[in-house]
Amino acid sequence: MMNRRQALSLSAAGLLAACQSVPARGAALPTPSLHQLAREKGLRFGSAVGAGRPGTVTASFDDPLYREILAHECGVLVHENELKWYVLRPDVNTYDYARADRIMDFAARHGMDVRGHTLVWHHPQWFPEWIETHDYGARPAAEAERLVVEHINAIVGRYGDRIDSWDVVNETVDPATGGLRRTALSQHLGDQEIVDLAFHTARAAAPNAQLVYNDYMSWEAGHETHQAGVLRLLEGMKARGVPIDALGVQSHIGSGNSDDSVGFDTAREANWRRFMDEVTGMGLDIVISEFDVHDKNLPADIASRDQAMAELARRYLDLMLSYPQTKDVLAWGMMDSYSWLQENWPRADGIAKRPTPYDANHQPKPLRQAIADAFMAAPAR
């Protein structure tokens, strides 16, 4: 995700070795499953999964015990990276669906729903290089429009109703300014116009799917400009009749996602409720789309770390689930070893992080119980 997903000095392979040990799960997975608990309240629970290069944090799908956790706990899967432009389209003429199809086939075998992430990640860093160097010709706006429409129609057309919810546009609001990011596509189409085009194209291609704008504005202090920018974007889309159904709230909570972040819990809950009230007041549903808890600034002691993370998660989920518009809760990974946070903003002590419901030994953690408790306490949808 944006700049915060740049790999730092520790390699993915080294981090994986640091946080993994021999799988030692002797007991059965906890019951009821998280998806069962969610379903009882009219919710869905699921997780991201990656089919990336073996030996990296993006290769969770290769781990058979990870797949077992997914099959037990999840009713929904989301591709971590496999549907993003830089993975799916190595060049202007090629679509490589091999990684994405592995996850789709697994979901089908286990009767799971699938969310699509993402049709347009509107951030210049995360488009493939050929987008920048492409010859847009004498009519660059028409060529940029052709590329976007062709891309969305190809992907949505391939998977059809097998994907029932799409992150149509991801992270187009600049958190520093609240304005819209400029990319090689939007410089030809217009900053707002590319967003509108993507949603209209997605609606035509997937008339029955939920269409979502997804972003990482958070309840922590320092996100006020980002929140305001997202509200302006949504208000403009609604005023223009753009077909949008929901806001995806990524929900990477805990320590701030920057090299110089300090503290762990800087939530501004009253401010966040005002933001949520504004969003739901537009008639939009809410998707908790990428949930995890960043423990960068917590003490090394595992017991106290896990307790603090579970307590924060429960507070956050209780708030979010108090809104009946919140229908989906998606973890951004189910096991610590494969979390994207392992290779971003390392802890000062160099130890592995614990951001997800299961540890590196495939054992459920207090965070998993906090999610379960939040579902049991949630009002029915």
Image (cartoon, rainbow, N blue to C red):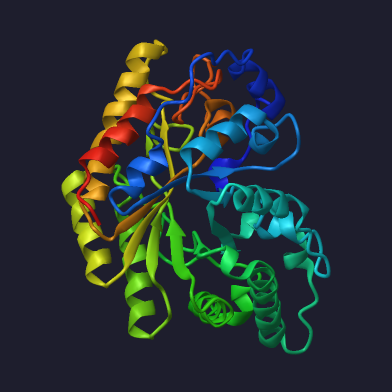
Q: Is residue 134 left or right of residue 298?
A: right
Q: Nearer the viewer, residue 381 or 5?
A: 381
Q: Quadrant of the C terminus?
A: bottom left
Q: Position of residue 55 (x, y in %)?
A: 73, 29
Q: Residue at x 27, y 33 (%)?
A: 373
Q: Nearer the viewer, residue 77 or 174?
A: 77
Residue 342 in which image quadrant: top right
Residue 92 in which image quadrant: bottom right
Q: Is residue 371 left or right of residue 193?
A: left
Q: Residue at x 66, y 74 (%)?
A: 157
Q: Residue at x 62, y 53 (%)?
A: 108
Rendered view: 120 above or below 288: below
Q: Position of residue 83 (x, y in %)?
A: 65, 57
Q: Is residue 361 left or right of residue 81?
A: left
> Would residue 359 be seen by someone viewing this image from the given angle?
yes
Rendered view: 103 above or below 21: below
Q: Residue furthest top?
A: 301
Residue 88 in which image quadrant: bottom right
